[in-house]
Image: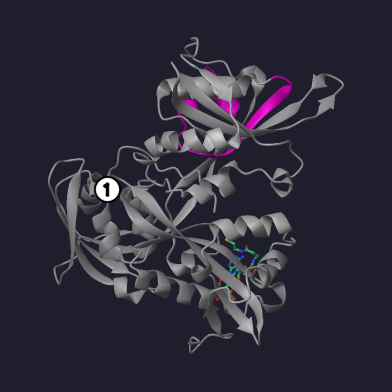
Amino acid sequence: MPEPDAPYPIRAGTPSGLKPLARPLMVAFGEEITHAELEEWQHTSEADRWLAAYEGETPIGTAAAFTFRLTVPGGEVAAAGVTAVGVEPGHRRRGVLRSLMRRQLDDVRERGEPVAILWASESAIYQRFGYGLGALNGQFEIDRARTAWLRPEEPAGRMRLVDPDEALATFPAVYERMRAVTPGALSRTEDWWRWAILHDAEHMRRGSGPKFRYLYEVDGAAEGYALYRVKGDWDERGPRGQLLVVEAVTPTPRALRGVWSFLFGVDLVRTIRASREPVPHPLQLALADPRALGMTAGDGLWVRLVDLPAALAARRYGAVDALVVEVADAFCPWNAGRWRLATAGGTGAAVATVSRTDGAPDLAVDVADLAAVYLGAFRLSDLARAGRVEERTPGAIRRADALFASDRAPWCSTMF
Ligand SMILES: CC(C)(COP(=O)(O)OP(=O)(O)OC[C@H]1O[C@@H](n2cnc3c(N)ncnc32)[C@H](O)[C@@H]1OP(=O)(O)O)[C@@H](O)C(=O)NCCC(=O)NCCS
């Protein structure tokens, strides 16, 4: 059924395959889809989760979603991973994105997924739809000559070059170890591993070399891994290659040391660049000269609480308390109103009951404010300093900080 206000009717599915749907998206990004890319999409995308806005029979805008599990403090939650958002430039700024977002969030709600998440091409786009800054994204580029460790010691294990099949057999268990304790991390299917992580195609290289896959082992047991490429170059002073880290996963301190020592040691490389890294980063504490990283922190995962009570009940809390929160949610009005968040059980792993109430509110927030504290990227007091939340009962923000406290900062290393 077309949306009553939609400028162009929206239909779900891929009745004529993915190729016609790729077109508005590719034009929006100024690109052209290759045969190889289409093949990857066939393996990873979910046909029934594609939405397209049509002019006649021609798709002019799209939005799709992946089905993920998102790690939250103390647990995980079903999350729709919003992707493939694009409007053909001849139809831009006529409300096509808005109608796609409307339909998509309604669908996500209907599917019973409490949360939607995305990476934004531009950070000004999605806040109007209730997305909040759920995880920061770290980037750095370090000169190989400045990578000394604060406390030098020999790595415990070693890195071994593996082919895609061996990587498929070994990397996921290492990743799962990290995912279990890292808010913001996403589940990966076998197809995702094969096609989105391990696969290497010409169009992915963008001027760099092939993807190398290295497993870090200590006494024969897998404990970390890295995927990287090298962009080789030379000048009058000699080699000045750049090593581009695709992903480095190091669930233990000795894996951190082993994997990064290796990446910092590859010959013919002058700088090492990594672009989907946690903030803060353990390397900022482990290196002798942390400023050499040139670390920057930008917006990472954007989070939308679609079913507010279910989303809040899916995580664990840092304190035992009860607060009444007045929530504004213009785009998903079913979340708006007063909610009582009451926790019980062990401090640090308290379970929440979230129910509607008429009680006097302790705090007034927008749904996007709760998204920013949901995974632990920010605290309510950070939002208060930014003028975004209002305390109605003295001390409520401090109590909310204690409630939403979580063990570690969120990190999402999965691009989608
Ligand atoms: C971003 C994009 C999808 C927007 O589509 P659109 O159909 O033009 O958007 P709409 O007309 O529905 O606009 C909805 C609202 O978002 C705003 N908006 C749209 N694109 C925006 C942008 N790039 N930056 C800031 N605001 C933007 C509009 O001004 C409008 O605001 P309003 O509701 O306050 O009036 C489209 O410009 C595009 O395809 N861009 C290139 C690809 C891209 O960046 N995709 C996003 C991938 S994450």
Color style of the picture: one colour
Q: Taking 167 as reference, is 87 above or below it?
A: below
Residue at (46% x, 76% y) in the render = 103
Looking at the image, the residue that sits furthest to the bottom is: 4
Image quadrant in which you'd find residue 130: bottom left
Q: Is residue 122 visible?
A: no
Residue type at mark 1?
Answer: Phe
Image quadrant in which you'd find residue 237: top right
The residue indicated by pointer 1 is: 404
**What's the magenta region?**
267-293
Residue 249 lies in the magenta stretch: no
Helix, strand or loop at disc 1?
helix
Residue at (39% x, 58% y) in the render = 79
Residue 402, x across and y down, in percent: 23, 44
Looking at the image, the residue that sits furthest to the right is: 236
Q: In what quadrant of the picture does the C terminus appear? A: bottom right
Residue 133, x across and y down, in percent: 44, 54
